[in-house]
Amino acid sequence: MDLINAIQFDSWAEFIDMGGYAFNVWAVYGLFALFIAVNILVPLRRRSALLRDLRRRARIDDQVALNSAATNRESMSGVQTAEAESQGQSDESVDAGDAIETSQPASQSASDLRRSQQGENS
């Protein structure tokens, strides 16, 4: 019972004074609060930075895929035109089915291209 009476304080001033050990006690409480805050806030900041970086990389990948698809489409149309001219045919005589077949890979979305690349890497 003496221990419980020794722990109790008669006033708020005694509680804050902590029996003469106020600096040590409150410094430990402060450091503990700082430790907890850092261990909560740092992972949250890292997570948001990681998500921001992943979104940026996804936009870049989409743009690269679209640019490469457009380049492929342009190079394919150039090959068809050159073949048609070498055979003495005009651009109108190129079959519509051939045009659809060559434009099909270019119409693939960037996410489809990314999935196919990930499948190859696995």
Image (tube, grey):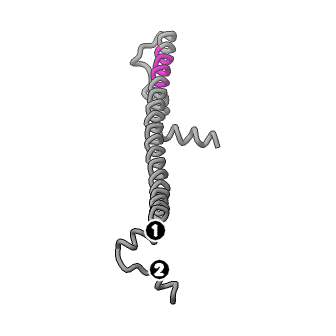
Label 2 is placed on what type of residue? Ile
The residue pinned by badge 1 equals 20
Which residue occupies the foreground of this view, 2 or 39?
A: 2
Q: What residue is shown at x 57% (from left), y 38% (from top)?
A: 117
Where residue 102 appears, as percent x and y from the top left, is 49, 28
Q: What residue is shown at x 45% (from left), y 13% (from top)?
A: 89
Hey, which residue is sitting farthest right in the picture?
Answer: 122
Q: Secondary structure at mark 2?
A: helix
Q: Which SS type dominates the magenta stretch?
A: helix
Hey, which residue is sitting farthest bottom in the picture?
Answer: 1
Image quadrant assignment for residue 17: bottom left
Which residues, given as a range, are shown in magenta?
Answer: 72-81
Q: Which mark is residue 7?
A: 2
Residue 55 makes an appearance in the image:
yes
Which residue occupies the foreground of this view, 108 or 52?
A: 52
77 magenta-colored: yes
Answer above or below: position of 28 versus 113: below
Label 1 is placed on what type of residue? Gly
